[in-house]
Image (cartoon, grey):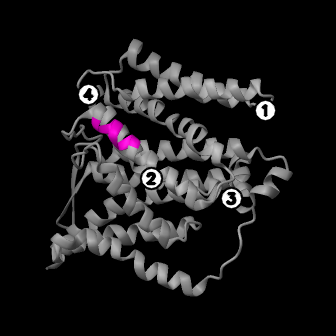
Amino acid sequence: MDAQIALLLAQDGLVNGAVYALMALALVLVFSVTRVIFIPQGEFVAFGALSLALMQGGKVPPTLWLLLVLAAAVLVVEAWRWKRGVAVDWNSALLWAVAFPLAACALLLLWRPAGLAAQALSTLVLITPLGPLLYRLAYRPMAQATVLSLLIVSVALHGVLVGLGLLFFGAEGSRTPAFSEARFELGGLQVTGQSLVVIVVTLALVILMFQFFGRSMVGKALRATAMNRVGARLMGVPTELSGDISFALAALIGAVSGLLIAPITTIYYDTGFLIGLKGFVAAIVGGLASYPLALAGALLVGQLESFSSFWASAYKEVLVFTLIIPVLWWRSLKSRHVEDEE
């Protein structure tokens, strides 16, 4: 290995690490607010990328029909809860189950976006409401369950979504056009415009997330829920709405990640699972609680994967996932067991 190859590998690791950073942020957000280890996070990546690819081919992505079915199911469940005398926040229910699906239908069936930017925007409108709808159907009825029970639900939901992905998109992979075709040469190193788009968008999302949690009332409510769910509820924070928002942000981040990597690599219906697992490794480095440590862990995972592909390409996945062992061992020595608050 010479300096040129090392720079190429470092660049590739930085781009991959940026995507894993987005995955890690979404996983930490969902877990801290709802205690859900959200294994299907990667499916938002695959669904977003493949939905955009179908739009590029002039087709209506079947993800739209999934959105409509989930929206109808949520409305039925909310109406049943309301009939039983349970207080229902119809504003949020109508937002996720009516407003967003209608907007997606208008965009995909009536407007039929033609440009890449318009199609990317339509993909975000299509994928983002899937998060809160899945939360309301699969997780909210078990909000008081143990973390292990919620993990089992996540595994089952992952299997269902992967099967639906195969049904919707088939076994063939797809790629989408790059958002930038520019190429630059920096010190003899070729840098593509799409790589810069990935890094810039990731930085922008990270900054926006920190600003959101630090300055907005909704962000502070999410932080309060993450710190102490019972205390937040006593102070008037609607914890169920916090779950909606956290899952919506996770779906949005997943869809953005899919749009960013689809021009770089071929995306298959099950590609998101591996990407989500690597984001999970980064999130574990942050203890599923620290956003800065999760970002650092994502960059570490990206660099480890990149250089492992040069030294031992057949074992690069093994080396990446082996990283979780010393992290868990170190955390087991540094932490002490406490009983759950609820």
* Residue highlighted by disc 4: 56
- Disc 1 target residue: 86
Disc 1 and disc 3: Cα gap in Å?
24 Å
The numbered mark, 4 or 3, whose residue comes first in the sequence reads 4
Instruction: Kindly report which numbered mark, 4 or 3, lies closer to the viewer in this rendering.
Output: 3
The residue at which mark 3 appears reads as 226
The residue that appears at 22% across and 43% down in the rendered structure is: 181
- Residue that extends furthest to the bottom in the rendered view of this protein: 333
Mark 3 and mark 2 lie on one chain; the one further toward the N terminus is 2
Snapshot quadrant of residue 49? top left
Q: Under tag 3, what secondary structure? A: helix
Which residue is depicted at the point 56% across and 45% down? 247
Secondary element under disc 4, as helix, strand or loop, is helix
Magenta stretch, main secondary structure class: helix
- Magenta span covers which residues? 160-166
What amino acid type should be assigned to the residue bearing mark 1? Val
- State the SS at label 2: helix
Q: Residue at x 79, y 32 (%)?
A: 87
User: Which amino acid type is shown beneath numbered disc 2?
Assistant: Val
